[in-house]
Amino acid sequence: MSTHFPTGLFESPFRPAWWLRNAHAQTLFSNFFRRPPVLSRTREELLLPDGDFLDLDWHKPAGWSGESPLVLVVHGLSGSSESHYVLGLQAALAARGWASVAMNCRGASGRPNNRPRAYHAGASDDVARVLHHMGQCCPKTPMALVGYSLGGSMTIKLMGEQQSSAPVFAAVAVSVPLLLTLCADRMDSGFSRVYRQHFMETLVAYWHEKAAHLERRGEDAAALMVREQLGRGPFRSFWHYDNEVIAPLHGFQDVHDYYDRSSPRQFLSRIAQPTLVIQSADDPFMTPEVLPGAHELSPAVHFELCRRGGHVGFIGGGTPLAPQYYLEKRIPDFLALQLAEMSGIA
């Protein structure tokens, strides 16, 4: 894969651990070998206007009074608030005295949600709803937003849609599928097909559980709708899955409409609040062609590109016994700098 950096993107100072230079090793290491921090969190069920709900996991460090920041963290596809990168970031934020909310997207918290709808790359409305709720709970607290992978797509889309009205002082998006068409194609080649197969098995199991849940609730019409879409499998690719399941259940005409309207790269030029985007040139979920040019980046976007880092990897350190998780320093550092500049301290 080419490591040419398009104009307008700056090279990251991150260097991978010598024992994790392979993209797949970076991507998979934490899933198999990391023991995430144990946090004391409070779960809140947030009711939504359409009768559905979101589960939010709050973590407030000892002594937090609401004057220091509150950060919303959004997971990626098939992730949750239990994902290692979510827990790791929440712990890193707490070490600075900052509170955080880990958002479980619809159906991702371990219990099926109550509507046929789930979540997808363009579901910025649910993120906006959570930010609004956080603002009501902590009206004088500065807020920030961090999204990983599919959650990063929602983050960039929200920041581009709301522009200067976004209720955050800064945002960060990591390993974002910037062009959904090319990312869907990438998942059909090489070792990436292993990831695709894992996602497909996880997602299909989720939808079957949702259909059974809707039937138990007496939502037979909704359950039938879900089962009809699942009946069009088995799904050979993300193109197939997104066309048969995601698009019709989320108000899109077809997969092309979904990808066109939800791909986050188009929103980068509209962002008005400081936003850091961290990508890796060797991400096995995408290709270099997804990267934007300088003309596509608003002045508020800081686009950091690593030569190696995999997908939500970015692990350094001298030995496997002492890995260093770059994102858990880089993200709080960026947010702290933006907060200082906003406050006129820097």
Image (spheres, rainbow, N blue to C red):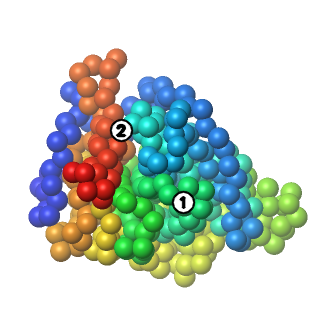
Q: Secondary structure at mark 1?
A: loop
**Residue 120 x %, y %:** 53, 64
**Residue 47 x %, y %:** 71, 61
Whether 142 is drawn above or below 83: the answer is below
Whether 234 is drawn above or below 335: the answer is below
**Residue 163 x %, y %:** 37, 74
Q: Which residue is mark 1?
A: 139
Q: Quadrant of residue 268?
A: bottom left
Q: Name the N-terminal-most of marks 2 and 1.
A: 1
Residue 158 appearing in the image:
yes
43 with respect to 4 (left or right) = right
- Residue at the spot 29% in from the left edge and 43% down from the top edge: 333
Q: Nearer the viewer, residue 99 or 259?
A: 99
Q: Nearer the viewer, residue 62 or 212?
A: 62
Q: Quadrant of residue 287?
A: bottom left
**Which amino acid, mark 1?**
Pro
Q: Residues within 10 Å of mark 2 (few under 14, many from 20)?
A: some
Q: Look at the numbered discs 2 and 1 and tell me whether their residues touch, using CB distance below 8 Å.
A: no
- Residue at the spot 65% in from the left edge and 51% down from the top edge: 55
Q: Secondary structure at mark 2?
A: helix
Residue 123 appearing in the image:
no
Whether 51 is drawn above or below 332: the answer is below
- Which label sits in the foreground, 2 or 1? 1
Q: Which residue is mark 2?
A: 328
Q: Quadrant of residue 263?
A: bottom left
Q: Nearer the viewer, residue 295 or 66?
A: 66
Q: CA distance from mark 2 to mark 1?
A: 26 Å
- Residue at the spot 38% in from the left edge and 65% down from the top edge: 156
Q: Residues within 10 Å of mark 1 (few under 14, many from 20)?
A: few
**Which amino acid, mark 2?**
Glu
